[in-house]
Every structure is written in C-alpha cells, then in structure tokens.
Image (spheres, helix red, strand yellow):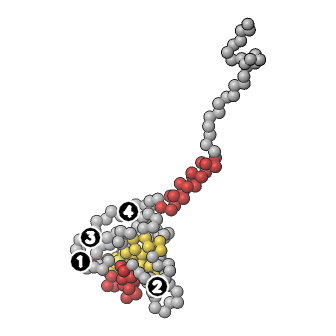
Amino acid sequence: MLDRSPAEDALGTKPKVRPVKPSRVPVWLVALVALVAVGWFLAGAPIGTVSDEPTPADRGSAVNVDSRFSTLDAVAVEELPDEARTTLSLIGAGGPYPFSRDNSIFQNRERILPLRDSGHYREYTVITPGEDDRGARRVVAGADGELYYTDDHYSSFREIVGDDS
C-alpha cells in the first residue's frame, strides 16, 4: 500500500492551489455611482441655507415691513403694476396662464432669491403692454407662499408683501 499524503491525488500529484483574489468593484460601477450621486445633487439636493428671519408683526405699512422670507427689498402689492396684480390673481386661481412657460420651475440660477431645493420656485409672466413677447417682468412664487417680483428679467428681485400676498 502506498502511503500518500492527503494533498495528493490518485496519480500522486499535488493539485494546483489557486490563490484567492480579493473581489474588486468594477471601475465602471464606481463611475456609475459617482454620476448618479452628482446628478442627484444637481437635481434636488439642498444647495444652501434657508433664511430664519422671523415674520414681522405689524411694524407699519407693507412698504416699510421687512420682507418675511428674504432680506430683499420689499414691494407692496398695491405698488405693483396692474398686470402684476393680474398675474397674482391668476396664480391664486391656479390659471389659466397666458404663456406655456408660466408655472414652470424657476431655477434661481442667479442665486438672488434665498437658496432652496430644486423645484421650490415657479415663474409667471407679467404681461408688459407694447411687448410682442413675454417681456422682462415676472412673478416668482415659492412653495412656502413667498412671492417675488422682477421687472428686469431676474437681474433683481423684490419680495411682494402686503395683505394680498
């Protein structure tokens, strides 16, 4: 009887032992996860801080009241052009709006309004008499009820304050 060590097979040869390689995550999978994370961040992750200023309580007329949602200058509803007040009425009624771009997401690319999650702001056209297109005037409404007015196509904003806002 032949005395074989347990590591030999029937022919007396030792089987080849393959070293165990540590498992690796494919590079393409790491890249895919990174792209998804970047896309998620750009599409809707919080990108700034929210103003925590308190709501002012009866400190004079609406024009002199500090704005409630921002540190921007305020404008009273009564001081807005008639067309802006019409736009505010349409927003309150849920439409119908005069332009297909109305009620679309406002990206806040200028970063003048307080920074909020993507989709927080919506924009609405304020018709400008004599213009044959949408013109430069807009109302931007936030999901928390804040309203902003621009008459220079997003170069500046004022927060709309007053009884009707």
Name the mark on residue 50. 4
Q: Residue at x 62, y 40 (%)?
A: 24
Q: Could you tell me if residue 91 is visible in this image?
A: no
The disc, 3 or 2, on the residue closer to the chain's N-terminal end is 3
Q: Nearer the viewer, residue 80 or 12?
A: 12
Q: Name the quadrant of the N terminus.
A: top right
Instruction: Sort mark 2 into few (<14), some (14-19) or many (20+) by Cα contacts within 10 Å.
Output: some
Do the numbered discs 2 and 4 sit on residues whose CB atoms are within 8 Å? Answer: no
Q: Could you tell me if residue 103 is visible in this image?
A: yes
> How much space separates mark 1 and mark 4, taking CA atoms?
25 Å
Q: Nearer the viewer, residue 2 or 66?
A: 2
Name the mark on residue 132. none
* 3 w.r.t. 67: above or below: above
In the rendered image, which residue does mark 3 sit on?
56
> How much space separates mark 3 and mark 1, taking CA atoms?
10 Å
In the rendered image, which residue does mark 1 sit on?
60
Q: Secondary structure at mark 3?
A: loop
Q: Residue at x 23, y 77 (%)?
A: 60
Q: Secondary structure at mark 1?
A: loop
Instruction: Sort mark 4 into few (<14), some (14-19) or many (20+) by Cα contacts within 10 Å.
Output: few
In the rendered image, which residue does mark 2 sit on?
98
**For the residues carrying marks 1 and 4, which lies nearer the camera in this image?**
4
